[in-house]
Amino acid sequence: MINVAPRTSSEMAFPNPFGGSRTDKNGNFTLPSVAPGDYTLRASGMRMIMSGGEGSDQMVFTTRINMGGGDGQTEFGSVPLSVSGDDVANVMIVTSKGTTAAGRVTWEGGSKPTNTATVRISAMPTDSDGPVVLSGGSAAVSADGAFEIKGLAGQRLFRAVGLPPGWVLKSIKANGQDITDTGIDVKPNEPLTGLDVVLTSKTTEISGSVKAGNDPAADYTVVIFSDDPSKWTVPMTRHIAGTRPNQDGRFQLKNLPPGSYYAVALDYIAQGEWNDPDVLERLKAKATRFTLDEGKVETLDLKLSGS
């Protein structure tokens, strides 16, 4: 499978806009209608998965690009690509097997939980889009906190999953560089070592109520988003959330990262529309700004705004 992904961080929020292409038996490929810009051109091994339930008269075929999590035998390759408007010919991609990412987990803010057997570190691709599914790799965490994920390539976002109650991800660094929200480009034949995953029991919570005029509101959506626009477009951002009220008319959100935020209560907004940077830019004018500290509970009293 051949595809292109924009090289700028803002465009990465909307990856792979031109679809993909498959090579022929000789390794030749063509990607039509690629707009001018700077890209990363990627080649990844792929396999077809056939599924169909018992008694079903339909078979479903899914294309899965095997980018990690297996035995590390799949081939990958990438090259930078600049498109100026003219056709680009004779591009050569040399593939190699995926590489390994290794590091250690540390527990901060309290005693290490007694049961950590469910904890895994995952490495999700940041450019999964459309009918082609990019597989994520993951690995269990050993008793001493070490982990190793094999067969990776491309831009990866690392996350800790299966955490015990009361624990959240605080940060991930690669040899001192914070990659928690940006991810990192894993290159074939260049093992990624020194990953430092910090988990914390100092969780955050935001709760409160909303009023429509002088009366309590019972039907609304609260959107909370970072006051830093650069955090709106990072892959799978942790800095934007939306919630509805509970049966008592109050709202609650847990485990947002510490930082400065805006909060706004709306009578209506479509599910997930708050992930659009243009929408958030418009919402700033009617939002309340506040600071969320590590390990703290923030209580907000908001006024209901129009859609």
Image (cartoon, rainbow, N blue to C red):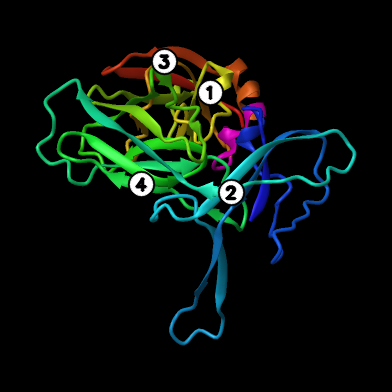
Q: Residues within 10 Å of mark 3 (few under 14, many from 20)?
A: some
Q: Tell me the residue at 48%/39% (across/down).
A: 189
- Label 2–label 4 contact, CB within 8 A: no
**Neighbour class for label 2 at 10 Å: few (<14), some, many (≥20)?**
some
Distance CA(mark 3)–CA(mark 4): 28 Å
> Would you name the residue on which mark 2 appears?
95
Q: Secondary structure at mark 1?
A: helix
Under circle 2, the secondary element is: loop
Q: Earlier in the sequence, mark 3 or mark 1?
A: 1
Name the residue that disc number 3 marks.
259
As measured in the structure, the alpha-carbon distance from the residue carrying label 2 to the one carrying label 4 is: 22 Å
Amino acid under disc 1:
Lys
Instruction: Please name which of the two marks, 3 or 4, marks the residue nearer to the observer.
Output: 4
Amino acid carrying label 4: it is Ser
C-alpha separation, residue under disc 3 versus residue under disc 2: 41 Å
Q: CA distance from mark 1 to mark 2?
A: 33 Å
Which residue is under mark 4? 138
Q: Closer to the observer: label 1 or label 2?
A: 2
Residue at left offset 47%, top offset 52%: 135
Give the mark nearest the N terminus, 1 or 4. Answer: 4
Span of residues in magenta: 270-278
Q: Amino acid at mark 3?
A: Gly
Residue 77, magenta (yes or no): no
Percent of width and height locating residue 60: 56, 73
> Residue 158: image x %, image y %?
41, 36
User: Residue 120, located in which quarter of the rendered image?
Assistant: top left
Residue where numbered disc 1 is placed: 231
Does residue 138 lie above or below 296 as drawn? below
Q: Relative to the observer, which residue lies in front, 270 or 307?
A: 270
Work out how far the residue at label 3 is from the one at label 1, CA to CA, in angstroms.
Answer: 11 Å
